[in-house]
């Protein structure tokens, strides 16, 4: 190698290194883009905090799960999204089936999040646990009268049960889980027995339904526990309590708000780092607490208000399986007249 050749080589190396450094600096400053079905007021503060900590901008778009998934599919490889966050495991399952998420191997996430709350291949990870269980009037119902979801179809609850709309994903996921557990015929019998016991037309929200229990329109209901958490925070004397369904059986139905890295993420490393940050103990506590949910990270305690409902055994079937049986659940509920 002549002197001039080696100088040219050095120059070339220097140029490559400079470009690499410039690129790395650019990559570190690249925004992280999140499509989130978890509501603005539940994510804004934490997302901004992560951005400040990392010196990047965290941009996010909020919408329901289905339109966000449709948008990801339509955008294909041109999508700016790095991460999809939903409030239903069925949505995460559908996004995975549609090839919109990519597998992530993270020992940290695998250690932090229990196996039934994440995709075995790492396409998505649950970040907050929402339990859908029985709520009852403390004025008119004794907890000893309660046991399973199915038992809400007993004649003793005739004209005393309130439900949210059957069009909502939370109920569709509950029925989907039931189909997986006991089969479609048995699940349909249960749903029909509930419809026969309704005290009122199904409600448009869990909150309105819980207020109907408090007001005496009905005595029992099936709700996500965090909606009661919000009402109890506003009014500690709110006359409705949580009962953990199916203890001693399959366990209480849980679903997750969780996220996965998109197939065409431009900022993959940052997206994984962000998921790991969200799964870390301190952030887990806050991520769940803003909505009276349970941290997905099993080592992290929930808020005292939430802990006051007592501990419960969750149904340990992987929450992703909800997605597979949801279409059958939707048809079943329609047949059974759950409006
Ligand atoms: Fe909700």
Image (cartoon, rainbow, N blue to C red):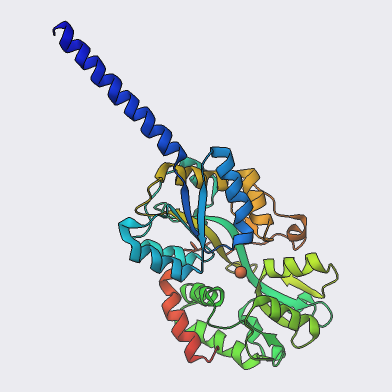
Which sits in the foreground, 192 or 73? 73
**Residue 193: image location, x then y, percent:** 59, 89
At a point 76% along the width and 88% down the height, the residue shown is 217
Which sits in the foreground, 238 or 156? 238
Q: Quadrant of residue 236?
A: bottom right
Vertical placement of residue 307 versus 4, above or below:
below
Q: Quadrant of residue 41?
A: bottom right
Left or right: residue 104 compared with residue 156: left
**Residue 140: image location, x then y, percent:** 82, 83
| Residue 118 shows in the view | no
Vertical placement of residue 192 versus 102, above or below:
below
Left or right: residue 306 compared with residue 251: right
Q: Quadrant of residue 325?
A: bottom left
Ligand 1: image quarter:
bottom right
**Residue 296: image location, x then y, percent:** 59, 54
**Residue 306: image location, x then y, percent:** 73, 60
| Residue 16 shows in the view | yes
Q: Residue furthest top?
A: 3
Vertical placement of residue 245 versus 217, above or below:
above
Vertical placement of residue 13 versus 257, above or below:
above
Looking at the rendering, in which quadrant would you find the C terminus? bottom right
Looking at the rendering, in which quadrant would you find the N terminus? top left
At a point 45% along the width and 71% down the height, the residue shown is 66
Left or right: residue 305 compared with residue 41: right
Count the numbered circles shown: 0
């Amino acid at each position: 190698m002549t002197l001039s050749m080696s100088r040219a080589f050095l120059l070339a190396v220097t140029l490559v290194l400079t470009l690499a450094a410039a690129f790395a600096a650019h990559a570190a400053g690249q925004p992280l883009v999140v499509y989130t079905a978890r509501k603005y007021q539940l994510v804004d503060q934490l997302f901004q905090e992560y951005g400040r900590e990392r010196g990047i901008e965290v941009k996010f778009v909020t919408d329901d799960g289905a339109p966000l998934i449709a948008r990801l599919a339509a955008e294909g490889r041109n999508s700016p999204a790095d991460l999809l966050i939903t409030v239903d495991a069925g949505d995460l399952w559908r996004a995975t089936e549609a090839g919109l998420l990519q597998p992530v191997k993270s020992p940290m996430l695998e250690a932090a999040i229990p196996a039934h709350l994440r995709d075995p291949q790492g396409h998505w990870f649950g970040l907050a646990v929402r339990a859908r269980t029985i709520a009852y009037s403390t004025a008119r119902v004794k907890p000893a009268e309660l046991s399973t979801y199915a038992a809400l179809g007993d004649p003793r609850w005739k004209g005393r049960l309130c439900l949210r709309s059957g069009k909502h994903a939370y109920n569709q996921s509950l029925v989907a889980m039931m189909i997986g557990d006991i089969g479609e015929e048995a699940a349909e019998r249960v749903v029909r027995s509930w419809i026969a016991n309704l005290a009122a037309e199904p409600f448009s929200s869990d909150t309105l339904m819980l207020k109907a229990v408090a007001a005496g329109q009905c005595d029992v209901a099936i709700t996500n526990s965090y909606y009661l958490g919000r009402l109890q925070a506003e009014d500690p004397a709110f006359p409705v309590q949580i009962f953990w369904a199916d203890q001693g059986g399959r366990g209480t139905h849980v679903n997750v708000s969780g996220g996965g890295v998109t197939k065409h993420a431009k900022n993959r490393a940052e997206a994984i780092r962000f998921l790991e940050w969200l799964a870390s103990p301190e952030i887990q506590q806050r991520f769940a607490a803003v909505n009276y949910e349970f941290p997905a990270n099993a080592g992290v305690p929930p808020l005292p208000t939430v802990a006051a409902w007592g501990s419960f055994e969750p149904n340990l079937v992987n929450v992703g399986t909800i997605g597979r049986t949801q279409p059958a659940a939707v048809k079943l509920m329609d047949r059974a007249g759950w409006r």
